[in-house]
Image: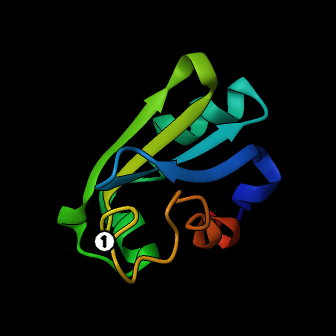
Amino acid sequence: MTKLVDVASVIRSKNSGPFEITFDIMFKEQAVFEDFAAKNVMTKAVFAKLYGMAESDVLSVIAFPPSKAVKITIVRPMASGALGEKDVYGAQQHGPLLTFSY
């Protein structure tokens, strides 16, 4: 098994507007990125299971070769800045990816 934290240089989450969060996985090496993308390791179903959410709330999983990155966008459970929302920037949501292995 390969730990994502061992092959990625960046794993982060951030706002993608007030109603969405985007997760970025940027790989250290081109070959590892290409293998990860070709094997379709991260799918909507895999991400939804990892985060305990409905697959329909995972809007996209896109490989982005110029950055050696995979970008995942989800529906925010609450709008950014809404009453009771605890992460206005969406920057604290990447934790489950830090333990992901494939």
* Circle 1 residue: 78
Q: Residue pushed farthest left?
A: 56
- Badge count: 1
Question: Residue at coordinates 42% horizontally, 48% vertically from top-left?
Answer: 72
**Is residue 27 shown above or below 95?**
above
Q: Residues within 10 Å of mark 1 (few under 14, many from 20)?
A: some
What amino acid does circle 1 point to? Met
Give left or right: position of 56 versus 38: left
Can you give x and y, in whole percent of width and height, for residue 68 in the image? 62, 27
Q: What quarter of the picture does the N terminus occupy?
A: bottom right
Question: Residue at coordinates 64% horizontally, 71% vertically from top-left?
Answer: 95
- Identify the image quadrant of residue 96: bottom right
**Which one is nearer the viewer's eye here, 33 or 25?**
25
Question: Residue at coordinates 61% horizontally, 67% vertically from top-left?
Answer: 92
Give left or right: position of 67 versus 42: right
- Identify the image quadrant of residue 101: bottom right
Q: Callout 1: helix, strand or loop?
A: loop
Can you give x and y, in whole percent of width and height, for residue 80 in the image? 38, 61
Q: What quarter of the picture does the C terminus occupy?
A: bottom right
**Which one is nearer the viewer's eye here, 65 or 16?**
16
Give left or right: position of 36 versus 59: right
Question: Residue at coordinates 69% horizontally, 66% vertically from top-left?
Answer: 98
Can you give x and y, in whole percent of width and height, for residue 73 in the image? 37, 49
Can you give x and y, in whole percent of width and height, for residue 18 in the image? 33, 52
Chosen colour scheme: rainbow
